[in-house]
Image: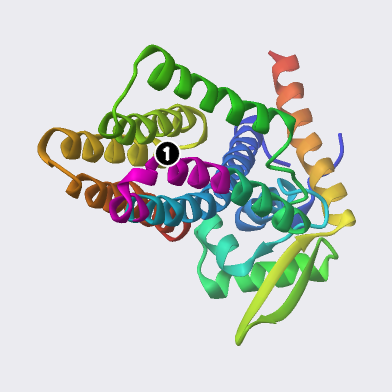
Amino acid sequence: MAELDEVIHQPLRLRIMAALNALPVSIGLEFSKLKKLTGATDGNLGAHIETLARAGYVAVDKAFVGKKPQTTVTATAAGRGAFSRHVATLQEIIAASEGER
Amino acid sequence: MIDSKEASAALSEIDEMVRRVRQSRIYDRASLIAVACGLLVVAGNLANYVVPRYGGVIWITVNLLNVVVVAAMSIVDYPKTARRTVDFRVLAAFVLFFAFGILATSVLGHFGPREMGVFWPIYFMLFYCLAGLWFGWAFIAIGLSITVLTLIGYFFITGFTFLLWMAVVNGGGLIVSGLWMRWGE
């Protein structure tokens, strides 16, 4: 059985990746929207996005919309692949446990 | 390695996030449409109040503009969403919606201006309520609220003041509920 991806498995990072993966390829979420969806605090969310970005799983784009800074987070191809494998591993764990019964 | 209970909990968490993201995207789009339609409805009611004899022309124009606004939003939003909101099925739905409304009000029912003013918003809100069964309770709350306020106007507000009431509760209601969907959720 494949190993779980430790970067993604942390609960908040799992939620972030699940949210980004639910979007069409190359479409991202604004930081404020991601914060609302995950229920995380600014600091916590920022730190976990940083971890995902270091792993190459998300791309962070900072831009100005008018005079307001706006951060958009998008899942990369590597991130989408890792997330799919992580989900497959979770499903394998459940299937294996059902097989043992 | 985790056990199957934890794996199952993680998958449930993923499903919940996917549901929230989808709902958020639907609310984002619907809120813009609600605000735009609300502004048009306010304008339509005020115009009808000022020149009542052109009510028919005013409301045909408002409804056509509604369709144009929804189509324009879909085109402008496409690079951000990678999804077409308006396709053949949506346009067909608009045609069926108006065809049934015209059949009920003008062919079978012979509604007067006041009944027309009540029927169309309530008919429109029926679809809000139905959409709510799939896309989230906010649609049901908005649909029911505007329906009740519209009926209050119909039974208790007489004369052309009714059009001002409709501008506030129908047009204003759509604007406020659009903003609520956008910022409150």
Magenta highlight: main SS: helix
Q: Which residue is at 28% across, 29% downward? A: B115
Q: Is residue B175 visible?
A: yes
Q: Is residue B75 above or below residue B115?
A: below
Q: Nearer the viewer, residue B162 or A77?
A: B162
Report if residue B39 lies within the magenta region: no
Q: Position of residue B63 (x, y in %)?
A: 51, 42
Q: Nearer the viewer, residue A23 or A64?
A: A64
Residue B60 as seen in the image, left or right of residue B165: right
Dot 1: what SS?
helix
Q: Which residue is at 53% across, 50% downward? A: B33
Q: How many numbered marks appear?
A: 1
Give, as a three-letter code, the residue at label 1: Gly
Q: Quadrant of residue B175?
A: bottom left
Q: Position of residue A7 (x, y in %)?
A: 76, 58
Q: Is residue B185 visible?
A: no
Q: Which residue is at 63% across, 32% downward? A: B8
Q: Which residues are magenta?
A: B47-66
Q: Quadrant of residue B11?
A: top right
User: In the rendered view of the protein, which quadrant contains the C terminus of chain A?
Assistant: top right
Category of crowding for the residue at label 1, using alpha-carbon neighbours closer than 10 angstroms: few (below 14), some (14–19), many (at least 20): few
Q: Which residue is at 20% across, 45% downward? A: B162
Report if residue B57 lies within the magenta region: yes
Extreme-bottom residue of the structure = A67
| Residue occupied by mark 1 | B56
Q: Position of residue A68 (x, y in %)?
A: 59, 83
Q: Is residue B32 above or below residue A4?
A: below
